[in-house]
Image: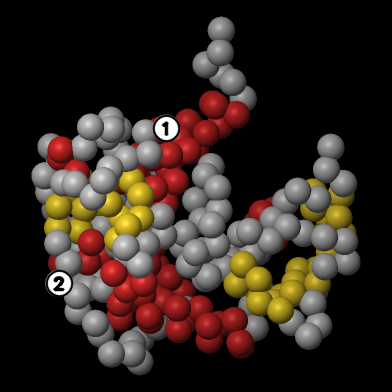
């Protein structure tokens, strides 16, 4: 059994399991830290950096999703510095690709859009890149619009760790990085895709969408993923 740790989050003294992350410990006491690449049930990679928190004095910036608690830890989750960093990260995500909410199937059901509201983004201070990225609609049921992808890799991790297919992966580097299916072939020709739709349920934006869904119809049901993870952990399907 993990040793209980006592720590401070935003001035509140709390107890947490020694194997818990700062994000989990904060959530248990009702402190919501912004996240984008985090998804319950799959391993964290700390990629988006939206969950950065200040730890110690002088404060170090650490990702809450992949930093485990320790005894006498002092964490601050909501400072002027952190608010400025989070807004800058969201602005850069908008500037990097083509996130035009008004014509996106996820409009109104988009986590990036929600984050923009939460961090108070009323404009983008950086020059838009406007990349001309492709849209792959070769799959029978789903499509992927790389213009709306934020490279959170939720689709990669869900496909690998929950479905076990590992159809999705990340190819290329830097600004050219992109999620791909199999060996960077059209999704519809993938030999490993099971068409389960878990990647579509996990996607935080309109990047992976269900074909036939019109604008603002892409409401996702993440309870499906939670149900699968819980059932697997509790071995509910074993006989």
Residue sitting farthest toward the top: 239
As drawn, is 40 to the left or to the right of 193? right
As drawn, is 178 to the left or to the right of 32? left
Residue 233 percent across, percent down from the top left: 60, 29
Nearer the observer, 119 or 90: 90
As drawn, is 72 to the left or to the right of 41? right
Residue 48 percent across, percent down from the top left: 48, 67
- Image quarter where the N terminus lies is top right
Residue 206 percent across, percent down from the top left: 26, 58
Disc 1, SS: loop
Q: Is residue 216 visible?
A: no
Among the 4 quarters of the image, the one containing residue 193: top left
Query: Is 74 above or below relative to 67?
Result: below
Among the 4 quarters of the image, the one containing residue 122: bottom left
Residue with the mark numbered 1: 164
Tell me the CA gap for discs 2 and 1. 32 Å
Residue 90 percent across, percent down from the top left: 41, 77
Which of the two labelled residues, at mark 2 and mark 1, occupies the earlier sequence position?
Answer: 2
Residue with the mark numbered 2: 132
Query: Is 91 above or below relative to 234?
Result: below
- Asked if disc 2 and disc 1 are in contact, CB closer than 8 Å, the reply is no
- Image quarter where the C terminus lies is top right
As drawn, is 106 to the left or to the right of 158? left
Nearer the observer, 60 or 85: 60
Residue at 14% x, 58% y is: 135
User: How many neighbours does mark 2 have within 10 angstroms: few (below 14), some (14-19), or many (20 or more)?
Assistant: few
Q: Is residue 214 visible?
A: yes
Disc 2, SS: loop
């Amino acid at each position: 059994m993990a040793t209980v740790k006592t720590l401070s989050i935003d001035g509140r003294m709390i107890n947490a399991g020694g194997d818990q992350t700062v994000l989990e410990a904060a959530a248990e006491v009702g402190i919501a830290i912004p996240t984008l690449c985090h998804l319950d049930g799959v391993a964290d990679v700390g990629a988006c950096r939206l969950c950065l928190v200040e730890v110690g004095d002088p404060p170090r910036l650490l990702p809450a999703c992949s930093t485990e608690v320790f005894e006498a830890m002092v964490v601050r989750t909501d400072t002027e510095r952190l608010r400025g960093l989070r807004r800058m990260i969201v602005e850069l995500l908008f500037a990097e690709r083509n996130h035009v909410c008004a014509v996106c199937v996820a409009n109104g059901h988009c986590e990036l859009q929600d984050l923009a509201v939460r961090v108070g983004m009323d404009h983008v201070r950086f020059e838009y890149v406007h990349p001309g990225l492709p849209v792959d609609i070769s799959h029978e049921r789903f499509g992927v619009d790389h213009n709306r992808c934020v490279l959170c890799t939720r689709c990669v991790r869900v496909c690998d760790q929950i479905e076990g297919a590992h159809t999705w992966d990340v190819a290329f580097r830097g600004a050219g990085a992109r999620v791909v299916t199999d060996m960077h072939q059209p999704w519809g020709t993938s030999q490993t895709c099971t068409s389960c739709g878990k990647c579509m349920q996990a996607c935080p934006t309109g990047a992976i969408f269900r074909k036939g869904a019109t604008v603002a119809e892409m409401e996702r049901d993440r309870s499906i993923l939670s149900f699968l993870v819980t059932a697997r952990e509790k071995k509910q399907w074993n006989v």
